Amino acid sequence: MSHFLSDEQVRIRDVAREFAQVEVSPRAAEIDNKDEFPADLVRRAAELGLFGLMIPQEYGGLDAGITTTCVVLEEIGKASPSLAGMLSVQIALCPVSMNTAGTPEQKTKYLVPSASGENLMALSATEPSGMMNTAAHQTRLTPDGENYRLNGLKIFCTQGSATVYIVGGRTSVDGQEGYGAAIVEKGMPGFEVGKYENKLGWRGSNTGTLIFTDVLIPRENILGGILTGLGEVSGLGGLTGNLGHCASALGCAEGMLAKTIEYAKGRELYGQPMTALQPITYWLSEAWVKIEAARSLLYTTTRMVEEGRIDPNMIMACKVHVCETAFEVCNRLLQVWGGHGMMNDTGVHRYMRDARVDLIAEGASETMLSGIAQSILA
Amino acid sequence: MNIVVCYKSALEETSMLVSSSGVDATRARHKISDYDRNAIAAGMGVATETDRVLALTFGGLEAKKTAKDVLSRGPDQVYAVIANDAASADGAATAKVLAAAIRSIGDVDLVVCGEGSSDSYAHQVGPRIAALLSMPVMSELSEFSVEGTAIKGKRTVGGVTEFLCADLPAVATVLPAAAEAPIPGLKAVLAAGKKPLTEMTLAELGLDATSLAPKTSAGPLTAVLASRKRILFPDGDASSQVAGLVGALVKEGVLR
């Protein structure tokens, strides 16, 4: 992969790699075990400028592009897929949604402090009825004079401890069904965050329930205007967010492979190194091949996006293939560890658990496949 | 004030291939020598807004590969003296080249070096530069500061702490404790691409290849490989097995 990166991208990767190895890796198991939001590491990521990777320079960001962003998230994913997942929301999803649909005033107000690390952002689309079927969503934006009132419930919001949330809700436009996205700030009267979920993977990410009770949403906090018909809130950010998510999953698989190779080299079975056992070498090699193939698909797609060739099918294919590969690799490699892999002390089963989350978060594999099917069968 | 920080592009240990036949560094990557990262941070730490911090290195073409990394850590400019056979240079030759470069840069008030490079750790270059430039040198500093026209430093040797002072211009060689080397932020990484890198040749410094003739030589690298002793203590009760284990560990020097 480094053959295709510019010198600048290599240096940015090296910064992310050093951050991951020196600061994230020693804390990764603890984040998973304690299920605590790693505020210190998130703050450090902001200090290093990672929050601004996808934010235009005029709003204080680096405008570094989705390839560079994915390279960074991949490095962090090797150490802590959970942290990489959180940062993907902050870096690749939310600011792109805001930048694509937001007014200049909204961008100045929300992107500038996001780039500097003052804002932690979240985008919440899932309701008890599901994410994609917005027709079944119960959260509503109701006109109130010049403004709106937001009522409803969102669940499974990654980064429930954010300071700014993009929240979708159904509404009506001249008697017709409509959809809008509200920018909700922490502390707005009527907005509260419910309990944080105790999850299988991505632990520490403060996945929370958002409760809206008659929250006054000023008109200027409607993102991108009210849409006629049912829609969704993420826009282009949903696509770049998926790619960031894939990068974190790819890093997860790479992290698991690196740890497993180290373990296999040092472990003796039947009086010989484990790496002298042919099935073990096959598993390791197959994992490497699958990771490289997934990487090739991911970065081909990020380049297409940067060239303006945005093909949702390719992005959905990435989401399916890279994330499924990451889980497959982590699950298979866990077998190399035998009983040791089941123990908390070795800390490797978190890779498998984090990779499992990737098959569902930000659009399940089947949702992606349905989207592709609609396109190729049309 | 002009501050020159000397650094070395050293081999990255993790990218070397280690086997029983030795160490293969032919495909090894280069990095800023570990202690030189601290030296750069130390130089930046004593610089005021009006000071110029210049980084200086000597090496083969690989020396340029780390220049952007150096610049992302704060220095305003990199000077790189490039010579094809730089790899054969020992501390004396390296110091000769760097001292000549410092004279060429001119008007240098403070030279900061890492205490040693992460690949050879010979502690040679900083003191030799000081001798060649007739500057005072303060070595093994765990703290240092510039106060007016003097440099003050702290050195701890064998449980004794010394507080040193010297007039500028001077050379300081620093330990990692002198300044933590932070990870550069991405804005600094991008800004580094716009900072100047000035290449110098031996000829421009009035030197030639004979200047690099080493006065010391090193044999081939050998690697320390961990190997299992495969010593078992199957006989006797637990206490005699433990006694056998402890005895073996003492014999190997693991326990005393």
Image (cartoon, rainbow, N blue to C red):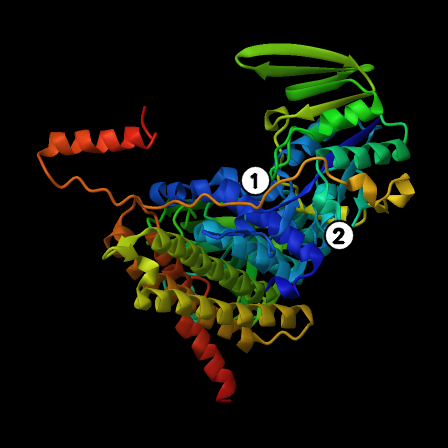
| Residue type at the position of mark 1 | Arg
* Left or right for B119, reference A318: right
- Name the one closer to the observer, B146 or A146: B146
Examine the image and state in which quarter residue A102 appears: bottom right
Q: Nearer the viewer, residue A275 or A348?
A: A275
Q: Quadrant of the N terminus of chain A?
A: bottom right
Looking at the rendered structure, the secondary structure element under dot 1 is helix
Question: What residue would you read off at disc 2?
Answer: B61
Residue A44 numbered mark, or none = 1
Q: Is residue B186 left or right of residue A330?
A: right
Residue B226 left/right relative to A294: left
Q: Is residue A81 left or right of residue B180?
A: left
Q: Position of residue A162 (x, y in %)?
A: 51, 46
Count of numbered marks: 2
Using the image, name the chain to which the residue with label 2 belongs: B
Q: Which residue is most to the bottom? A: A378
Decide if residue A183 is in sight here.
yes
User: Gap in Å between the C-alphas at discs 1 and 2?
Assistant: 34 Å
Can residue A189 be seen by looking at this rendering?
no
- Residue A46: percent from left, percent from top: 60, 43
